[in-house]
Image (cartoon, coloured by chain):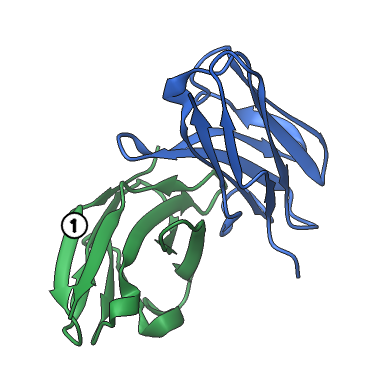
Chain colours: A green, B blue
């Protein structure tokens, strides 16, 4: 079975600073990977996805993530964050052969002025 | 395109009462998921359906919880009798297939007094 670990439960940063939210997964077979964002009092929204092809994936709001198969990681990055990026971010994994998504525990990103 | 629609958005009721949460998935999506989110436990998958058939209900807390999907455009999650510890935000999500990106509704905030 697949699993995913988000290494940081909370990440505080200052506005305009770069940020990296870490995600590692465990699976013996091929996977699809996703990042979701949840703003307060809202549902989860898809930020970006890796299904195949280029290992560098660009998503909405200036975020990007890199799939690293050798390190089984899918870290999320943004070069310069805004106050409005304050939210909870979830990494998710599933098998290419077909299974439901497994979500990580979430990382609360707080952007301070 | 209409997204996943959940109703009600908020529900406040007294313990012992029956609670019914409703979900309309995105048209054409074959997989439907029910999640519960709390501060203590985070995001938990309760049950999911493929083509209206329950595939995995191992996350359903106990017999007080039941879910149905009578057709491709409607699902319910019922709690009977409700207890204060059931207070949470309940999300419904749908996807074209179980291993494809899920689209979340805005959730139902349930408070059991």
**Residue extending furthest toward the right:** B71
Residue at figure coordinates x 53%, y 36% from the top left = B110
Q: Secondary structure at mark 1?
A: strand
Q: Is residue B89 left or right of residue A109?
A: right
Check the image and report above or below for B4 versus A26: below
Q: Which residue is labeled 1 in the image?
A: A10
Residue B47 or residue B82, whichever sits in front: B82
Left or right: residue B61 compared with residue A112: right
Q: Position of residue B102 (x, y in %)?
A: 57, 56
Q: Position of residue B40 (x, y in %)?
A: 30, 35
Image quarter where the N terminus of chain B lies is bottom right
- Image side of residue B36 versus residue B106, left or right: left
Give the answer, above or below, for where B17 lies relative to A84.
above
**Residue A25 coordinates in the image, percent (x, y):** 30, 52
Q: Position of residue B59 (x, y in %)?
A: 49, 26
Which residue is located at x 55 percent, y 21 percent?
B14
Residue at 67%, 37% in the rendered image: B49
Q: Residue drawn 65% across and 54% down?
A: B95
* Crowd rating for badge 1 (residues with CA inside 10 Å; few <14, some 14–19, many 20+): some
Count of marks overlaid on the render? 1
**Chain for disc number 1:** A
Q: Which of the 4 image quadrants contains residue B80? A: top right
Tell me the quarter of the picture where residue A63 sits. Answer: bottom left
- Residue B88 can be seen in this image: yes
Give the vertical position of A7 relative to A110 (above or below).
above
Mark yes or no: residue A50 visible.
Answer: no
């Amino acid at each position: 079975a697949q699993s995913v670990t988000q290494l940081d439960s909370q990440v505080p940063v200052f506005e305009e600073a770069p940020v990296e939210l870490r995600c590692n997964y465990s699976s013996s077979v091929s996977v699809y990977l996703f990042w979701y964002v949840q703003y307060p009092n809202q549902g989860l929204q898809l930020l970006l996805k890796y299904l195949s092809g280029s290992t560098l994936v660009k998503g909405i709001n200036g975020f990007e993530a890199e799939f690293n198969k050798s390190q089984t990681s899918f870290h999320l990055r943004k070069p310069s964050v805004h106050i409005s990026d304050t939210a909870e971010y979830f990494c998710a994994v599933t098998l290419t052969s077909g299974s439901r998504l497994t979500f990580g525990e979430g990382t609360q990103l707080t952007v301070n002025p | 395109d209409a997204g996943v629609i959940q109703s009600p958005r908020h529900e406040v009721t007294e313990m012992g009462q029956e609670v019914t949460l409703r979900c309309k998935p995105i048209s054409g999506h074959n997989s439907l998921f029910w999640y519960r989110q709390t501060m203590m436990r985070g995001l938990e998958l309760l049950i999911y359906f493929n083509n209206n058939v329950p595939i995995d209900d191992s996350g359903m807390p106990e017999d007080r919880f039941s879910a149905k999907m009578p057709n491709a455009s409607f699902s319910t999650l019922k709690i009977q009798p409700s207890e204060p510890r059931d207070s949470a935000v309940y999300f419904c999500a749908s996807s074209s297939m179980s291993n494809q990106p899920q689209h979340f509704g805005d959730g139902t905030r349930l408070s059991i007094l």
